[in-house]
Amino acid sequence: MQDPSLSAVIKPEVRGLNAYTLKHFDADVKLDQNENPYELPLDIKREVVDRVLRRPWARYPEFVPAAVISTLSKFTGWTQEGILVGNGSNELIQASLNVSLGPGRRCAMPQPTFTLYKLMATTLQAEVMPVFLDSENLTFNVDKLIEASRRADVVVVCSPNNPTGGLLEREALIALLKNAKGLVLLDEAYHEFSGQTALPLLSEHRHLIVLRTFSKAMSMAGLRFGYMMAHPEIAREVYKSKLPYNVNIFTLAAAEIVIENRSALNRGIDALIRERDRVFAELERREAVRAFPSKANFILIRTARPARELFDGLYSHGVLVRDVSAYPLLDRCLRVSIGTPEENDRFLAALDRVLETN
Ligand SMILES: Cc1ncc(COP(=O)(O)O)c(C=O)c1O
């Protein structure tokens, strides 16, 4: 029986949503969350622990974590006044949308894309304007995106796009920025694997927000850290919606030390890019598989089999991937994160075994 009090207290838009959640599976080969398979070096982890041990745990972090913001500013070349840090970039996506969306406002976004944008925009009672990817190649429909951006208060674009892997080319982004009437939120969660960033465009476009995470290339998904860069005027407004003391002292220390040691991560990132290209070439050789070109650390594939069947088959061989077949346009699709060469070989071997069987 429906509880009448629930519909009275919860917004109808929220009641109509499915929560963003992921069932937990244990697996030998975990290729379902686009994490970095390479752990941070032990000496870096030790340095983090040592630094945190020297700090009082009974005291709040600084209100504005100046040290990490200054380190990020040096690393990116972007002004400190235009940088906000978050407990994961998800939190900053939410803060940005909180200050820009509400009833009567519109949020344009490509579809399919990262689920959270629609979830948050809908929770805020904004109208979501989906701009579908090209249904054959799953690439961005730039003309339609630009058209929508002229009527939207916010455009959210994830580039490279999760879960398809395609990049919004620089020229297309510039055209989008020239036409958009509102904010352009560019989620660069996977930019390290793409060789492209919108950072140089920030100074000329005060309605651009660039979001980044330490959960992917930076090997810190377990510690939750992300940052955003925008014109200081915009950052000041988003700041109003960010919770105080949102990043804990452990994560702050880790982020700072990891940026200082960024070059130690380069080998792993280069290896993942090489592996992505190798796995893609391997997949292309298989007639039963359609692989979509990716500039991220994952590849979207489609086969003739129902996605659930393929997912279960791979899982029975110890390989966990993501079933994304419920997303718009992604019937029979799975998303596979790039792991170590051994993990990728296990995925390819399992895929062959599963596709062999009827
Ligand atoms: C496009 C995109 N943005 C943001 C995130 C989340 O980042 P964080 O872990 O920093 O909250 C993800 C994680 O899957 C993602 O795919």
Image (tube, rainbow, N blue to C red):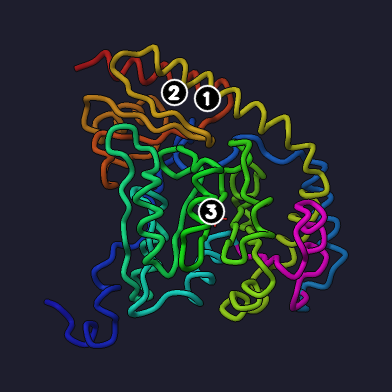
Tell me whether the residue at label 2 lies in contact with that at label 1, contact meaning CB atoms closer than 8 angstroms: yes
Q: Is mark 2 within 8 Å of ligand 1?
A: no
Which numbered disc flags the more N-terminal residue, 3 or 2? 3
- In magenta segment, residue 24: no
State the residue lying farthest toward the right. Answer: 54
Give the answer, above or below, for where 43 lies relative to 109: above
Q: Amino acid at mark 3?
A: Asp
Give the answer, above or below, for where 148 lies relative to 272: below
Q: Amino acid at mark 2?
A: Phe
Residue hosting label 3: 187
Give the answer, above or below, for where 29 lies relative to 74: above
Q: Secondary structure at mark 2?
A: helix
Q: Is residue 154 left or right of residue 186?
A: left
- In magenta segment, residue 79: yes
The stretch of residues the image draws in magenta is 62-87
Which is in the foreground here, disc 3 or disc 1?
3
Q: Is mark 3 within 8 Å of ligand 1?
A: yes
Residue shown at 63%/40% (left/top)?
192
Which is in the foreground here, disc 3 or disc 2?
3
The mark found on residue 234 in the picture is: none
Q: Could you say which quadrant of the image residue 307 lies in?
A: top left
Tell me whether the residue at label 3 lies in contact with that at label 2, contact meaning CB atoms closer than 8 angstroms: no
In this view, the residue in front, 204 or 352, is 204
Residue hosting label 2: 347
Q: Amino acid at mark 1?
A: Glu
Which quarter of the figure is the N terminus placed in? bottom left
Residue shown at 38%/39% (left/top)?
322
Which quarter of the figure is the C terminus placed in? top left
